[in-house]
C-alpha cells in the first residue's frame, strides 16, 4: 500500500525526539543569575536565595513533553520558596508532581502535609494549593501530571499529597522516574505515548496499595458520575445546545451535583470551553482537512469569531491563524521550544 504524504509526515514526526525545554543561569553574570532564574520560573513560586545575590545562583532545568506528562529535572542552589494563594489563583495550575532527589534535600509544608525530600525518597506534592519550603544544593527529577488525566484517583492523591510516598510500589515508581530521566534524550515522540500510559498504570497501582486513602462510597460514585459527564460532553462537543442544563437533563443529575463534580476543574462552563478549544487546536494542527479557521470554530460551538480568537490566544499563547499556518508549512508552533516552565506546564491540560 502506498504511503500518503500525510502518513509519512506523521511517521517521521513520531520518530523525532520528544520536545524539550532547557534553561541554565550559567550564561548570565553572577549578580544576574538569581533574577534570571526567577524570571524563568515566573508564577511558579516566590523565591529567595540563601546566599547573597552577588555570589551567583546555579539553576539548571531540562523539561520534556511526554504526551500527557512533563518530565523535569532540576539542579539548584540553596533557596526558599513560597507558593501563595495568590499564585495558585493566577497560575490556574491543577497538577501533581511525583519527584525523587538524587542529591541534597528539601523541606516543604502545606495545610495537608509536609515532607523532607532526600535522595531515593519519592514525594508527592500539588500545585493546586499553597505551600512553603526550602532546599539546599539539590538535584531531583519530577513528573508533572494533570488532575484532568487522573480524575479517577484524584481523591486518593489529594489525601496523600505533600507527603513522602511509602509502600512497595513507591520504590518501583521512583525507579521508573530515575530510569526515564537517564534515558530521556534518546526517547522518541511515539515512545513517549507508551511511557505516559505506563506511568498511569504504575500510579494507579501505587494508589490502590493504600485503600484507607479512599472514601468507601463517595469517591467511586463521584468518579463514575464525572466519567459519565466527561463522556457526555465529549459526545456533544459540537452541539450548539451543550450547556449545564443539557448535561443535567441528559445524566439525570441536579445542577448542584454537576457543579460539585466540576468544582475542582474551574467549573463546568470553563471545562466545556477548554475542551472545545482543545478540539479546535487539534483540528487546526493535526487534522487532514484544511478547513477555514472560522469553520472549525463554528463546528465546535464558537459562534463569535472575535471571542473565539481571543479565548484561543489566551489559552495557547498564539492565534488560531498562526497555529493553522504552522501546521500547513510543517513548522514548529509558536513557543513550542521556548517560553517559561509555567508555559510548558499549561500545555499538559491542552495537548
Image (cartoon, grey):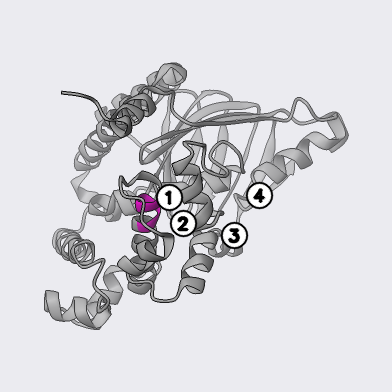
Q: Which residue is mark 3?
A: 87
Residue 42 badge:
4
Mark 4 or mark 1, which is nearer the start of the sequence? 4
Residue 111 percent location from the top left of the image: 48, 58
Q: Using the image as rendered, state which of residue 290 and residue 10 is in the foreground.
A: 290
Boundaries of the magenta span: 280-284
The residue labelled by disc 2 is 128
* Residue in view at x 62 percent, y 50 percent: 45
Q: CA distance from mark 3 to mark 4?
A: 10 Å
Q: Secondary structure at mark 3?
A: helix
Q: Residue 244 placed where, x, y %?
A: 27, 79
Q: Are marks 2 and 1 in contact (CB under 8 Å)?
A: yes
Tag nearer the camera, 4 or 2: 4
**Which of the numbered marks, if any, corresponds to residue 28?**
none
Where residue 343 appears, as percent x and y from the top left, is 56, 48
Badge 1 marks a residue whose secondary structure is strand
Left or right: 295, with 220 as reference point: right
Chief secondary structure of the magenta span?
A: helix
Quadrant containing the N terminus is: top left
> Which of marks 1 and 3 precedes in the sequence?
3
Q: Is residue 282 magenta?
A: yes
At horizontal 42% and vertical 60% (from top left) the residue drawn is 293
Task: First in sequence, mark 2 or 1: give its number.
Answer: 1
Residue 104 found in image quarter: top right
Any mark on residue 95, and which?
1
Amino acid at each position: 500500500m502506498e504511503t500518503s504524504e500525510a502518513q509519512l509526515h506523521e511517521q517521521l514526526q513520531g520518530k523525532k525526539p520528544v520536545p524539550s525545554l532547557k534553561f541554565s543561569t550559567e550564561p548570565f553574570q553572577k549578580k544576574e543569575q538569581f533574577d534570571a532564574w526567577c524570571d524563568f520560573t515566573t508564577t511558579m513560586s516566590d523565591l529567595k536565595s540563601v546566599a547573597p545575590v552577588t555570589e551567583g545562583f546555579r539553576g539548571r532545568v531540562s523539561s520534556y513533553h511526554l504526551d500527557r506528562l512533563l518530565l523535569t529535572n532540576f539542579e539548584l542552589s540553596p533557596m526558599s520558596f513560597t507558593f501563595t494563594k495568590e499564585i495558585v489563583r493566577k497560575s490556574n495550575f491543577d497538577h501533581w508532581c511525583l519527584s525523587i532527589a538524587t542529591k541534597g534535600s528539601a523541606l516543604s509544608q502545606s495545610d495537608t502535609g509536609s515532607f523532607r525530600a532526600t535522595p531515593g525518597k519519592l514525594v508527592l506534592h500539588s500545585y493546586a494549593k499553597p505551600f512553603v519550603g526550602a532546599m539546599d544544593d539539590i538535584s531531583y527529577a519530577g513528573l508533572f501530571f494533570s488532575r484532568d488525566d487522573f480524575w479517577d484517583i484524584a481523591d486518593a492523591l489529594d489525601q496523600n499529597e505533600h507527603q513522602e510516598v511509602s509502600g512497595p510500589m513507591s520504590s518501583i515508581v521512583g525507579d521508573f522516574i530515575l530510569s526515564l530521566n537517564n534515558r530521556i534524550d534518546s526517547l522518541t515522540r511515539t515512545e513517549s505515548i507508551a511511557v505516559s500510559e505506563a506511568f498511569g498504570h504504575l500510579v494507579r497501582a501505587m494508589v490502590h496499595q493504600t485503600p484507607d486513602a479512599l472514601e468507601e462510597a463517595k469517591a467511586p460514585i463521584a468518579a463514575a458520575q464525572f466519567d459519565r459527564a466527561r463522556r457526555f460532553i465529549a459526545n456533544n462537543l459540537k452541539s450548539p445546545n451543550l450547556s449545564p442544563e443539557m448535561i443535567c437533563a441528559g445524566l439525570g443529575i441536579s445542577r448542584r451535583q454537576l457543579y460539585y463534580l466540576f468544582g475542582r476543574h474551574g467549573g463546568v462552563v470553563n471545562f466545556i470551553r477548554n475542551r472545545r478549544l482543545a478540539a479546535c487546536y487539534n483540528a487546526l494542527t493535526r487534522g487532514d482537512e484544511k478547513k477555514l479557521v472560522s469553520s472549525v470554530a463554528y463546528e465546535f460551538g464558537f459562534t463569535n469569531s472575535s471571542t473565539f480568537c481571543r479565548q484561543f490566544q489566551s489559552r495557547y499563547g498564539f492565534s488560531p491563524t498562526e497555529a493553522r499556518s504552522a501546521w500547513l508549512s510543517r513548522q514548529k508552533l509558536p513557543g513550542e521550544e521556548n517560553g517559561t516552565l509555567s508555559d510548558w506546564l499549561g500545555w499538559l491540560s491542552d495537548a
